Image (cartoon, rainbow, N blue to C red):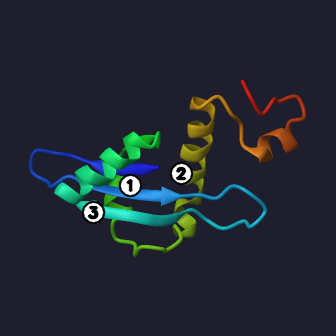
Amino acid sequence: MAQQNSSKHKQKSAVGLKYQQGDNKEAPKIIAKGFGDLAEEIISLAQQNGVLIHQDPYLSDFLATLDLGQEIPDQLYHVIAELIAFSFVLQGEFPDSWAKEHSKVSKKV
């Protein structure tokens, strides 16, 4: 998932997150971040690889303060979890945890 921020007075920024679904229970991590031309390259690579992009200048600004490899902080778990869950739905899938909690939910739509 990549985040981008764009305005007339600010340089474009992008932050990439990675979440490994499974039993490891690790939080999403920052795997890429950059500004200007590097941000454009991160966004382009994300698009080429089918990574969904969410535009939110406030979230992007906050995530850009984190270090590469750093897990997202506790206060962002809910927001990021909703974005990840929504990305699953947009791709016609449901997270494993949904199928376990709601036995009538199919993993594929």
Query: Disc 1 and disc 2: Cα gap in Å?
Result: 9 Å
Q: Are marks 1 and 2 in contact (CB under 8 Å)?
A: yes
Taking the image as shown, residue 28 lies to the left or right of residue 100, namely left
- Residue drawn at (47%, 39%) of the image: 50
Query: Disc 2 and disc 3: Cα gap in Å?
Result: 21 Å
Q: Characterize the local packing of mark 1: few (<14), some (14-19) or many (20 or more) Cα atoms within 10 angstroms.
A: some
For marks 2 and 3, the one nearer the N-term is: 3
Q: Is residue 89 visible?
A: yes
Disc 1 on helix, strand or loop? helix
Query: Disc 3 and disc 1: Cα gap in Å?
Result: 14 Å
Q: Amino acid at mark 2?
A: Val
Query: Which quadrant, please, contains the C terminus?
Result: top right
Q: Which residue is mark 3?
A: 34
Q: Nearer the viewer, residue 73 or 21?
A: 21
Disc 3 on helix, strand or loop? strand
Q: Which mark is residue 13?
A: none
- Residue drawn at (53%, 59%) of the image: 18
- Residue drawn at (37%, 58%) of the image: 15
Disc 2 on helix, strand or loop? helix
As drawn, the residue found furthest toward the top would be: 109
Q: Which mark is residue 59?
A: 1
Q: Which residue is mark 2?
A: 79
Q: Is residue 36 visible?
A: no
Q: Amino acid at mark 3?
A: Gly
